[in-house]
Amino acid sequence: MICRKPAIFFAVPLLLSACANSGANYVPVIDGAVGPSYESDLAQCQGLAASQAQVDGRTATAVATGAGVAGASSVIFNDNSDNLGRAAAVGAVAGLTSDAIQRNASREAIVRNCMRGRGYNVVG
């Protein structure tokens, strides 16, 4: 039997490091010169993005939907409920991941729009 738990200890830090320049920590690409208040403006915009809720009803809905769809699919396609719990757990993680990705994108948009509102020519 292969022990797969140690792989999680390597995968999680790798995934977290991939998110270093995303979400509220996003640093937009600015076209043109930046003024002396750029760092302060960026910090304030990132703070605004970070103030958004991490978890809310939408997160719970995504988790429940993922668990329900995966569980139902397992029963329908396998014609039994032997793996129902595992399928529901995988679906719940998929729903949680999907919600986290959407929240990251939303926070990046907040930083971009905030910087645009402060007069920067944000291109990405």
Image (cartoon, rainbow, N blue to C red):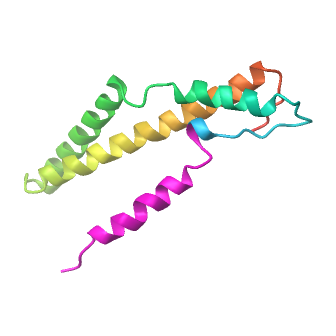
- Residue at (88, 30) in percent of width and height: 35
Closer to us: 46 or 23 = 46
Position of 46 relative to 13 (above/below): above
First to last magenta residue range: 1-23
Give me the residue at 31% from left, 47% from top: 93
Q: Quadrant of residue 44?
A: top right
Q: Residue furthest right?
A: 33
Considering the image in quadrants, where does the C terminus appear? top right
* Residue 29 to residue 119: above or below: below
**Residue 59 counted in the magenta span:** no
Tell whether 95 sits left or right of 26: left
Taking the spot 27% from the left edge, 68% from the top edge, the residue there is 5
The quarter of the displayed image where residue 61 is located: top left
Q: Main secondary structure of the magenta part?
A: helix
- Does 21 appear in magenta? yes
Q: Nearer the viewer, residue 106 or 54?
A: 54
* Residue 94 on image: x %, y %: 34, 46
Q: Position of residue 83 (x, y in %)?
A: 13, 56
Q: Exactly how many numbered labels are in the figure?
A: 0
Would residue 9 be found to the left or right of residue 44 on screen? left
Res 107 → quadrant: top right
Counting from the top left corner in percent of width and height, residue 26 is at 64, 40
Q: Residue furthest top?
A: 117
Q: Position of residue 114 (x, y in %)?
A: 70, 23
Q: Which quadrant, please, contains the N terminus? A: bottom left
Residue at 7% of width from left, 56% of height from top? Answer: 82
